[in-house]
Amino acid sequence: MSNQYQDITVNQLSYSYTENPLIHDLSFDFKAGELFNVVGPNGAGKTTLLYLLGGILKPQSGEILLDGIPLSSFKRPALARIMTIIPAESNIAFDFTVFDIVSMGRYPYHSPLASLTNNDREIIREAIEQTGLTKYKNNIFNQLSSGERQRVLIARALAQKTSILLMDEPTVHLDIHYQLDIYRLAQSLAHDKNLSIFMISHNLNYASMYSDRIMLMNEGRIVKIGIPDAIFQPELLSDVYGTALSVYPHPKTGKPTIWPD
């Protein structure tokens, strides 16, 4: 990777939009080679936390450290070479091709009017190939399916050559095939490319299958952090989600699967 920052540590982080705190005193960490998934009901504060980690929002108290260095000490251009936010979906106003969108990941390394170098083009080609988009590289982004567009956003992040990916519900609106595709790709990026993957998810079963660790949140607080077996306990989940849930081992993997009673 192009930089050394891969481990994030959060210490006593709090944030609020109003007088009522939305994020309460969060402390946790995630690191290189790990798919760290955050789950919890709507309004738990998951996306707000992602924006805090990405430097879009500024915490009211507490700190976020990149390999021990305060996030606040990094200027935006430097941060763009360290981490990338991958949104749940992206609306592009113009008819850019897949190659055009992925090439935008190289912007942090150039002045606004600079042309792509041969090295840039090779990095873009690798990102497109790695996400299985080679045959779509000249297609118009807005004409792709939702799953294909999501892979383009991931390819853009890979072209940016950051070591930390912050993924905000990357499988929302996708069918089963593309949901599995994105989860497998995220796991591969963590395990095979040694990236730090922070993902927000509402699909508990896929989170169980592919995550290394899971953080369960509710009402802006951490309920529990651990491996899927430790988090996906029926009493705990039923209490957090406010509905009766049962947990059974997957018939092939043994990983916990969650079903409503």
Image (cartoon, rainbow, N blue to C red):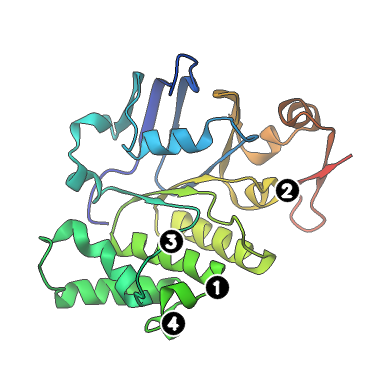
Residue plotted at (44% across, 38% down):
50
**In terms of sequence position, does the residue under pointer 3 or pointer 2 come before the other?**
3
Which quadrant of the structure image shows residue 107? bottom left
Which residue lies under the disc numbered 4? 136
**In terms of sequence position, does the residue under pointer 4 or pointer 2 come before the other?**
4
> Disc 3 or disc 1, which is closer to the eye?
3
The amino acid on which the numbered mark 1 sits, given as a three-letter code, is Ser
Q: Is residue 44 above or below residue 110?
A: above
Which residue lies under the disc numbered 2? 255
Residue plotted at (44% across, 85% down):
135
The disc at residue 91 is: 3
**In terms of sequence position, does the residue under pointer 1 or pointer 4 come before the other?**
4
The amino acid on which the numbered mark 3 sits, given as a three-letter code, is Asn
**In terms of sequence position, does the residue under pointer 4 or pointer 3 come before the other?**
3
Circle 1/circle 2 CB separation < 8 Å: no
Left or right position of 231 against 93: right
Percent across and percent down for residue 222 are 56, 24
Count residues near mark 3 (Cα–Cα under 10 Å), then give few for <14, some for 14-19, many for 20+: few
The amino acid on which the numbered mark 4 sits, given as a three-letter code, is Tyr
Left or right position of 216 against 28: right
Q: Helix or strand or loop: what does disc 1 sit on? A: loop
Left or right position of 48 against 69: right
Q: Helix or strand or loop: what does disc 3 sit on? A: loop
Left or right position of 36 against 111: right
Residue plotted at (55% across, 73% down):
145
In whole angstroms, how far apart are the C-alphas of marks 4 and 3? 18 Å
Which residue lies under the disc numbered 1? 145
